[in-house]
Image (spheres, rainbow, N blue to C red):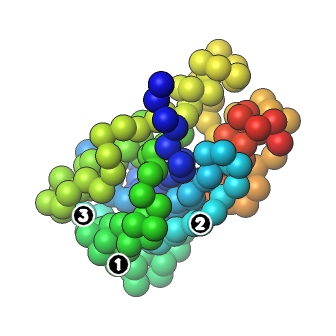
Amino acid sequence: MRIPNAYYLIIDLEATCSDDGSIPESEMEIIEIGAVMQNSKTFEIESEFQTFVKPVRHPELTRFCLELTKIRQDDVDVAPLFPQACEMMKGWMADFPDVLFCSWGNYDRNQFVTDCNFHGIEYPFGAEHINLKAQFSKSSGPRKRVGIAGALKYLGLEFEGTHHRGIDDARNIARIMRHVCKNV
Ligand code: AMP
Ligand code: MG
């Protein structure tokens, strides 16, 4: 029998984006890493990590991106570049040796791979990744795949904090996990 990992490492990323095609999907870059360490037995969040990241391909955030994420231009201007942000995250993760990388959909994993390749750094997670969005619709959720806000609504919960901010999205994904797996 597979021994469950001690922690769910729930990560939600925000990235550069546009609504007019000025930033193609292939050129999107991470601008926020939001992460929570959720104990897989108690479903309590035991630690959190958040950093903004300075994008290099499209350093000026579009109006669309500013409005979607509520991240300010100043936040990213003074933020570390991706390799340094990744090192900071790895430092935080080092206290938790047995983690399983989870995110709502595969986007966050794919964007991490893209940014690691672009900057020529090693992917910081193990090979395993859980797509919680897919799991949710397969098990307890609606048949159609839904976003974080949709899943919360389905469970009768409200989004807490600011939607499309990495750290708040990650916290809310953890709430969905706790509700589904522990019923609280
Ligand atoms: P989310 O975790 O849902 O906030 O989305 C992560 C990232 O995906 C955002 O920071 C944007 O870069 C991109 N994104 C999300 N929704 C949209 C949208 N409606 N149009 C374009 N890009 C989006
Ligand atoms: Mg998000």
**Labels 1 and 3 touching (C-beta < 8 A):** no
Q: How many marks?
A: 3
Q: Residue at x 65, y 15 (%)?
A: 143
Badge nearest the viewer, 1 or 2: 2
Q: Residues within 10 Å of mark 1 (few under 14, many from 20)?
A: some
Where is residue 66? Give x, y as percent: 53, 64
Q: Residues within 10 Å of mark 3 (few under 14, many from 20)?
A: few
Query: Disc 3 marks which residue?
Result: 57
Image quadrant assignment for residue 151 = top right
- Left or right of 28 on screen, residue 3: right
- Disc 1/disc 3 C-alpha distance (Å): 14 Å
Q: Secondary structure at mark 3?
A: loop
Query: Disc 2 marks which residue?
Result: 47
Q: Secondary structure at mark 1?
A: loop
Where is residue 155? Give x, y as percent: 80, 33
Q: Tag 3: residue type?
A: Arg
Query: Disc 1 marks which residue?
Result: 80
Q: Is residue 153 visible?
A: no
Q: Residues within 10 Å of mark 2 (few under 14, many from 20)?
A: some
